[in-house]
Amino acid sequence: MLKRSFDILASGAGLLILLPLLGLIALAVKVDSRGPVLFRQERVGRNGTAFRICKFRTMHATSSASGSQLTVGEDPRITRVGRTLRRYKLDELPQLLNVLSGDMSLVGPRPEVPRYVRTWDDETKAIVLSVRPGLTDLASIQFRNESMLLAASDDPEKKYIEEIVPTKNKLAVRYIEQQSLWLDIKIILRTLAAILR
């Protein structure tokens, strides 16, 4: 209950404070390339319930809804503005709406697409999907340069499924076992510090 109250207050305040910035980003996305300002994609949420995550569009409209669901290195699908948004994680800001609506939390395991959730074992699904997915988590900090790690692999999807996903899920389980409001605040501060660095 305390966590949900914190999510509502923080996401609501964040949306109000960031409104001018959100407007500027929306304008930049619209001017930079054709297509909608926002990108929505199906993700797996709490208890396995599907929801549509909301981001600023960072890829060309003709490619963002098709092709690989992984972003690898200097992906040619990414727009000029999109590259900057991804670098500073600004494309994630519309997910404050997902937090406000209750689909997500500020802190929790990052929501995965159904395709990769199907590769998890039943025990992992039961634990990781027992909580609301988050805007940030320990894995977001550790794998901040995930696309570059994938770019260094001969088979990015294999590396993602066999190496990165299991590590992310271990961090998610650790978070769920230890979760508290204070831990959430520490993860938020660590995320902001990582972005600023």
Image (cartoon, rainbow, N blue to C red):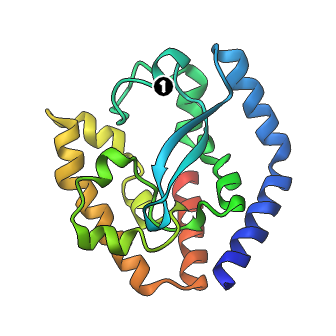
Viewer-closest of 21 and 34: 34
Pointer 1 residue: 64
Residue 14 seen by the camera: yes
Q: Quadrant of residue 47?
A: bottom left
Where residue 178 sits in the image (x, y, percent)? Answer: 43, 86
Where, quadrant-wise, is the N terminus in this rendering? bottom right
Going by the numbered disc 1, the residue's amino acid type is: Ser
Where residue 76 sits in the image (x, y, percent)? Answer: 41, 18
Residue at position x 46%, y 19% from top? 63
Residue at position x 55%, y 19% from top? 61
Q: Using residue 74 as the reference point, say whether residue 99 is left or right of it.
A: right
Where residue 194 sits in the image (x, y, percent)? Answer: 51, 57
Residue at position x 42%, y 77% from top? 175
Q: Using residue 9 as the reference point, say whether residue 45 is left or right of it.
A: left
Q: Is 42 situated above or below 31?
A: below
Viewer-closest of 171 and 129: 129
Label 1: which secondary element? helix
Residue 197 seen by the camera: no
Where residue 147 sits in the image (x, y, percent)? Answer: 35, 39
Q: Is 154 situated above or below 120?
A: above
Q: Quadrant of residue 16?
A: bottom right
